[in-house]
Image: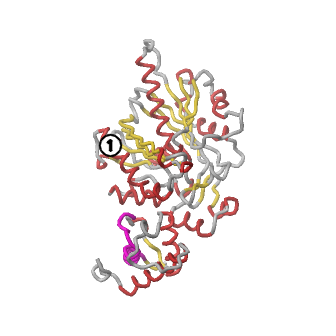
Amino acid sequence: MTALEAVSVYLPPVRIPVETLAGPLGLSGMQVKLFRRFHGLREVGRDPDASLYDLLMKAAAGLDALRGQEHRVRYVLYARTMPVVGPYPVNPLHEVCRALGLGHALAFTVTHQSCASGLLAIDVAGRLLAGDAAGGQQHGQAEPLALILAGEKAFTREAQVFADTTIFGEGASACLVSAFGARDRMLAYAASVRGDFDSDTGANDARLQREYRPSLAGVMQRALDEAGLTLGDISVVLPHNVNLVTWQRMCVLLNFPRERVVLDNIPTSGHVFCADVFANYQTACERGLLQPGDRYLAAAVGAGGGATFAAMVFEH
Amino acid sequence: MTAQDAGLDGEFRQQVLDTMTTVLTRLLDRTEPVTEDMRLMEELGLSSTFGLELLLEVEDQLMILIDVEVMDPDQMKTVGDMATFVAGHSRPG
């Protein structure tokens, strides 16, 4: 069963208030007020001196479980919101792999589900590793691992703000995944890929806004059903950091207590692309919200080129 | 449910409603007035983001804070529904 072996997160110490971003992003006074008052996005993290390579390396540097285990890493998956993050032929992923001693691993990017690609990467990593094991593993060999990286530089306007909905923050995460690990086992994964929300083909943003919460609730329920659980069995929800009001309203829709949704990072870090779920996992652990055996639910929505609603159930 | 049934201050609700219809008329650039029974989505094309902008303006003009975190947008069918919610879920700002 796919398992999260270790998680490390880097969130830059420099915080930029939303008011400071208003000029460069061309936000009106009303939009700034909207972000601060209702979306709860007070500031976002930026690391102006760090490249994308630097961000990913800072996250990987905290992954102590990787030290001395590099030879076990068979796959490196980069979960990404934006299809393009640097000028060709620069490839931060391969640079990071080389620097970490993972040049032997098969490295590739997962980006087709935008901000929901982080959960997809966990599923893909587990499937690849399990598939290899089914094909035969040498006796006595340590269990192979996959490394999932996430996080981006907010270097274009599109990568900094999303249509009155969210503001992206810089940061990165690194997560080791195994196929049969004992802790933070993935119990279920559900995703709904909605090409009909592709704005390039004339999809209506208002319809996406209308169907956003019910669609996310639907996929969360599917994941719970697959795990044989109900929402009442869930200790905490790890959200994507789109904004506060979306999750406050999700709680109303789901009849789930707001205090059990890890919303701590939204006001200070913003939407850290695909790294949200890992950052919120770390926060949940640091706050003591997860005890051994607790079940929790991670949820994300990726919008852009369609929309993907995704949810994953874990046991800590 | 009427404002009275909901235990609301009818005068305040009317103040909220007047503010909302005025703001909506301006934001939507309408020549015809917005009325209490108009459906927010179907008739006025209000998205959730636009709805939040409306609430921000109402907060500013009436100097109140609205408890949006307990709002269920699915229950806000008409302009009047939203006015009732605001009147019952706000405090001086």
| Quadrant housing the N terminus of chain A | top left
Q: Main secondary structure of the magenta part?
A: helix
Please tell me in which quadrant of the rendered image residue A137 appears.
top left
Q: Chain of mark 1?
A: A
Q: What residue is shown with label 1?
A: A224
User: Could you tell me which residue is drawn at 43 percent across and 19 percent down?
Assistant: A133
Question: Above or below — where is A314 with respect to B23?
Answer: above
The residue under the point 59% across, 39% down is A59
Q: Nearer the viewer, residue A303 or B62?
A: A303
Which region shows up in magenta? B73-90
Residue B39: x and y, percent?
Answer: 40, 70
Q: Residue at image x 32%, y 43%?
A: A224
In terms of secondary structure, where does tag 1 sit? helix
What's the amino acid at mark 1?
Leu
Where A195 sits versus A186, above or below?
A: below
The 10 Å Cα crowd at callout 1, few under 14, some 14 to 19, many 20 or more, is many
Q: Residue placed farthest to the top in the image?
A: A139
Give the side of residue A42 with respect to residue A239, left or right: right
**Residue B66 located within the stretch drawn in magenta:** no
Q: Position of residue A127 (x, y in %)?
A: 44, 27
